[in-house]
Amino acid sequence: MEIFRNSRLRLTLIYSSIMCIFLIVLIVGVQKVMNWSFDSEQRRELFDAANGVAEAQAYQIQHPNVTIDETRYYRNTNDRLFFYVFDKWGQLVGFMRASFRVEPFILEYMNQESIPNGEIKVYAYPNENGRMTSIMMTSKKIRLGEIEQTIYVGKDVTALYSGLQKATMALILLGVLALILATIIGHIMAGRAIVPMKEAYERQKQFAADASHELRTPLAVVMASADLLLADKSIQNPLLREVIQDLKGEVKKMSKLVSDLLTVARSDNNALKIKIQKLDLGDLLNQNIRMMTPLAEKKNISLSGVNIQECFIQGDEQKIKQLILILVDNAIKYTTDGGKVTVAIEKITEDSVSFSVQDSGIGIAPEDQERIFDRFFRVDKARSREMGGNGLGLSIATEILRLHDGKISVSSELGVGTKFTVELKTVR
């Protein structure tokens, strides 16, 4: 059924949304941790390298005639690590050159920008292949007497950043696959969770159908007995006759409820059958107006038709009559004495015709307008009970329109009135 399909989809959507949020947080967290880990490790290596070069330069300044083993102080040297040493006049006094592909870029940045002492900066530029090359650099100043030098130490971290980017993309891909898998599993689990509810609903549905069917006969017997008692001239007691009349009225209400329940049960079981034929909608509307006029006059309500004209539709005559009766009966029921109910054909096109039933009754609050088509929903339960309403009329009307591929809409304002508009397909 539609209600269970929608519930299953909603449960799947909720589960998938939760998993999506969880995976996004997880991926972002892992990416941040990886980035912090890589970045902090590279920064530590640069600081160690800068300190090593500074110690080597200080030793060489203090012992100019001693040859030193630079690797002793510069243990982290590799093909991606480099340094340049400048004196206070900007003359290059020592270096371990970077790759010839990145050296022009590095020298240009060292000439154009000043890296604060002890800070680390990352520079990026596009190489000849259009890919971004990333260079991490730091600086360190040393002073020994009048000698002052600035050491620039850097490292080509392109491969590391590229690896981090690929790892992030891999995480996103795994996250998407995990989300798809979680959605499938969630859909399966939601289906299993709904099975007991669906079984209980099916049992309840079958009970309603069986009970409605079985109640029709005893109610008919009670109604016939009440008619016989009212026809018995020997019963002259006014109070007794009033009690019998009240009994007959309650049986009528009960019979209508049983009939509505049976209709709903049959619609749930797809057992409602319709006999499609060519119908004059204008004639059906006029018939209903004539039939309901005495009921309207009892409440001093004006029931009239506007623009009722000949227009043909394809439909089941009894079902369309029931649809019109539900709408007009509701309009009269919820319109106060002295009010007005209008039945009108709104628009006729080649493909469809729309008619409306408008009243000047109590109106429907905006928050209730979406629920009035739900089964057993009543805006004012106390008043609905007094008026004989059971909350099934509009639900049945919706089912009738579903069988005819029709539509229904409502517009209402509290204290002003309500207008129901129905659209049906015309005969081509």
Image: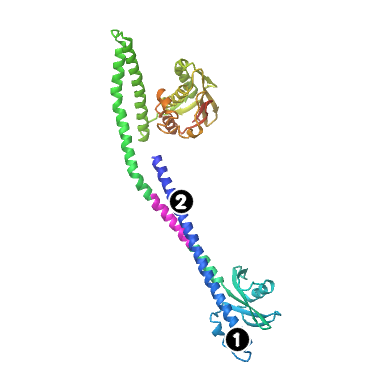
Find disc 1 in the rendering and name its residue. Answer: 59
Crowd rating for badge 1 (residues with CA inside 10 Å; few <14, some 14–19, many 20+): some
Residue 324 belongs to the span the image colors magenta: no
Residue range of the region highlighted in magenta in the rendering: 171-187
Find disc 2 in the rendering and name its residue. Answer: 17
Q: Identify the residue at horizontal 42%, vertical 42% (top origin).
A: 6
Crowd rating for badge 2 (residues with CA inside 10 Å; few <14, some 14–19, many 20+): some
Residue 383, picture quadrant: top left
Is residue 272 visible from the viewing direction of this image?
no
Q: Is residue 343 above or below residue 405?
A: above
Local SS, label 2: helix
Q: Identify the residue at horizontal 40%, vertical 52% (top origin).
A: 184
Residue 177 belongs to the span the image colors magenta: yes
Residue 154, picture quadrant: bottom right
Compared across the picture, whether 396 is left or right of 81 comes to left
Label 1 is placed on what type of residue? Tyr
* Residue 204 drawn at (x, y percent): 32, 36
